[in-house]
Image (tube, helix red, strand yellow):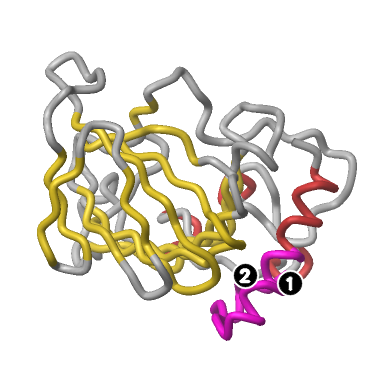
């Protein structure tokens, strides 16, 4: 992805969040210049902040996701105290796919915070981590539901679903853009995503412009 494209997407996402009356912590709006001279290890070590991906598709509009991690623990650190939970906000465009994947460790609730409907398609995984032909049992708004393999759950604004490890899921929005939330156990996107297809989680970036906001993958490589 081009940095100029990422800049436009982040600026647009902030505008959408503002219209939805969802606001980020102060540092979520900082420029790289604002970071100079500051070192906040919980933010950088736990990969809090802006995250964007096209899953290696080269077509963000059709297959992509914008995320902002608000809070998270760190499975790589043994020191205590260490948070055991995480939270994200996500911007999902209409018909924009986050492809099938599951997590080996993370349990998560995905929440429709507002906008259109969030469509989630589900499969169990078998012992070879392929699609299973068994019924998927999930909790939707704390009510048990049974979903046929490849079946859909429609989350209208305010709705939520609990996804356990090893449950394949893909999602996209219908009837307008969705502001989605995620509340989960500690999350490590570097090691805990099993995509059904062979995909990339983080984008390769062509630096055709200076960033307006740092991404989580920028923390290690940039001085600020």
In the picture as drawn, the residue positioned furthest to the right comes out as 208
Distance Cα–Cα, label 2 vs label 1: 8 Å
Q: Quadrant of the N terminus?
A: top right
- Give residue 30's quadrant in the image: bottom right
Is the residue marked by circle 2 packed among few (<14), some (14-19), or many (20+) residues within 10 Å? Answer: few
Q: Is residue 128 above or below residue 177?
A: above
Q: Which is more toward the observer, 138 or 149?
A: 149
Q: Residue at x 37, y 23 (%)?
A: 196
- Is 151 displayed left or right of 157 in the figure? left
Q: Which is more toward the observer, 98 or 188?
A: 98
- Is 161 displayed left or right of 57 in the figure? left
- Expressed as whole percent of the image width and height from the top left, the position of residue 182 reads 36, 61
Instruction: Report which residue position mark 1 lands on.
Output: 34
- Local SS, label 2: loop
- Expressed as whole percent of the image width and height from the top left, the position of residue 64 reads 60, 42
- Is 113 displayed left or right of 140 in the figure? right
In the picture as drawn, the residue positioned furthest to the top comes out as 128
Q: Are marks 2 and 1 in contact (CB under 8 Å)?
A: yes
Q: Residue at x 20, y 67 (%)?
A: 81
Write down the region rendered in magenta: 11-30
Mark closer to the observer (2, 1): 1
Instruction: Report which residue position mark 2 lands on.
Output: 38
Q: Residue at x 10, y 58 (%)?
A: 144
Q: Which is more toward the observer, 78 or 28?
A: 28
- Expressed as whole percent of the image width and height from the top left, the position of residue 143 reads 12, 65
């Amino acid at each position: 992805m081009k940095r100029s494209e990422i800049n436009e997407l982040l600026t647009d996402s902030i505008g959408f969040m503002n219209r939805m009356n969802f606001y980020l912590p102060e540092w979520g709006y900082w420029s790289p210049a604002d970071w100079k001279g500051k070192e906040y290890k919980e933010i950088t070590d736990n990969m809090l902040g802006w995250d964007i991906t096209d899953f290696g598709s080269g077509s963000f509009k059709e297959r992509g996701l914008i995320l902002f991690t608000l809070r998270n623990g760190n499975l790589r650190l043994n020191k205590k105290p260490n948070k055991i939970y995480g939270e994200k906000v996500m911007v999902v465009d209409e018909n924009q796919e986050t492809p099938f994947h599951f997590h080996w460790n993370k349990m998560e609730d995905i929440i429709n915070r507002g906008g259109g409907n969030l469509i989630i398609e589900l499969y169990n995984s078998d012992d070879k981590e392929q699609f299973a032909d068994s019924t998927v049992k999930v909790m939707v708004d704390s009510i048990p539901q049974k979903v046929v393999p490849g079946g859909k759950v429609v989350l209208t604004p305010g709705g939520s679903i609990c996804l356990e490890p090893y449950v394949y899921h893909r999602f996209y929005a219908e009837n307008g853009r969705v502001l989605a939330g995620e509340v989960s156990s500690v999350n490590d996107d570097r090691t805990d995503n099993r995509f059904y297809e062979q995909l990339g989680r983080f984008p390769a970036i062509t630096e055709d412009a200076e960033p307006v906001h740092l991404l989580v993958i920028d923390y290690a490589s940039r001085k600020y």
